[in-house]
Image: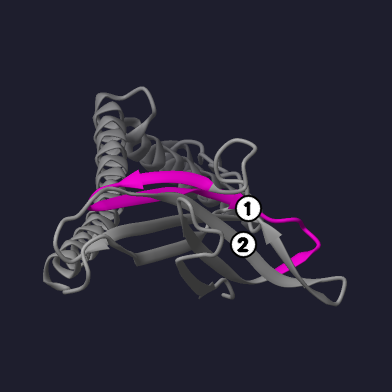
């Protein structure tokens, strides 16, 4: 017994202190992981967006290049539109020159009595106003050159009005129904005339009455229907 007590005294008291580690619930760990991932994603997104922010030099250069491209596109569209319009005008001018060449050629090559007038050509087109027409009438003296031709030009619209066939004289020169013309080789008469809204125009009668005559020397009818 004494030996046992002696041994215990030599060994000293036994240290019974134990370290305790706190235990966190599993959902706290999950929340922490989610927060860390969110912070990482936010930091990455912030770094990615900094060079592309509206106030950055790269963004300013991109916007300037975009504006320049838009201006160039507008210029190209305007140039293309103007080119199309100019081409249409050139085509109209070419057609007009061809008609003039045919007109003058007909005057020079046709053989007839000197001093004989002729309606060489008539062109009638509707304007943007459905009640208005633009006309172009070419008068010529065929054959060898003779004395000047004097007379009056008359235009008459023929059509239906209130279910009846009617004729309406067109005022060409101020308040006069007929236009006085005087030419030696050729004469071009052009202008615009309008018709009543109630009139359904079908044709245009062109007449030329020489000075001193009561009946038309020339008379031709041209269609006005679309």
> Could you say where residue 56 lies in the image, as x and y percent from the top left?
31, 25
Residue stretch rendered in magenta on the structure: 179-200
Residue 127 falls in which quadrant of the image?
Answer: bottom right
Q: In which quadrant will I find the C terminus?
A: bottom right
Q: Residue 101 magenta-drawn?
A: no
Element under disc 2: strand
Magenta segment, principal secondary structure?
Answer: strand
Q: Nearer the viewer, residue 81 or 38?
A: 81
In the picture, the disc for residue 150 is none
- In the rendered image, the residue lying farthest to the right is 162
User: Would you say 173 lies left or right of 68 here?
Assistant: right
Disc 2 to disc 1: CB gap under 8 Å? yes
> Could you say where residue 89 lies in the image, as x and y percent from the top left?
28, 52
In the picture, the disc for residue 156 is 2
x 51%, y 51%: residue: 33
x 57%, y 44%: residue: 20
x 25%, y 30%: residue: 58
x 12%, y 65%: residue: 108
> Could you say where residue 187 lies in the image, as x and y percent from the top left?
31, 50
Q: Nearer the viewer, residue 82 or 1?
A: 82
From the viewer's perspective, is residue 162 above or below residue 133? below
Q: Which residue is denoted by mark 1 in the rendering?
A: 170
From the viewer's perspective, is residue 5 above or below residue 84? above
**Mark 2 / mark 1, whichever is N-terminal:** 2
| Mark 2 → mark 1, Cα distance in angstroms | 6 Å
Q: Is residue 2 visible?
A: no
> Could you say where residue 167 lies in the image, as x and y percent from the top left?
71, 66
Q: How many marks?
A: 2
């Amino acid at each position: 017994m004494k030996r046992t007590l002696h041994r215990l005294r030599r060994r000293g008291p036994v240290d019974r202190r134990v370290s305790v580690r706190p235990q966190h619930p599993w959902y706290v760990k999950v929340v922490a992981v989610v927060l860390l991932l969110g912070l990482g994603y936010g930091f990455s997104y912030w770094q990615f967006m900094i060079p592309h922010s509206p106030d950055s030099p790269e963004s300013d250069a991109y916007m300037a290049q975009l504006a320049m491209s838009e201006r160039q596109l507008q210029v190209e569209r305007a140039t293309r539109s103007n080119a199309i319009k100019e081409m249409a005008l050139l085509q109209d001018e070419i057609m007009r020159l061809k008609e003039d060449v045919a007109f003058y050629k007909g005057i020079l090559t046709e053989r007839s009595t000197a001093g004989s007038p002729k309606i060489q050509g008539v062109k009638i087109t509707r304007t943007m106003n459905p009640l208005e027409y633009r006309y172009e009438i070419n008068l010529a003296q065929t054959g060898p050159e003779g004395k000047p031709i004097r007379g009056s030009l008359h235009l008459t619209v023929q059509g239906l009005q209130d279910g009846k066939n009617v004729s309406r004289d067109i005022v060409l020169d101020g308040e006069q129904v007929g236009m006085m013309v005087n030419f030696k080789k050729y004469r071009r008469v052009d202008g615009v005339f309008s018709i009543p809204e109630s009139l359904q125009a079908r044709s245009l009668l062109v007449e030329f009455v020489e000075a001193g005559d009561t009946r038309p020397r020339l008379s031709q009818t041209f269609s006005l229907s679309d």
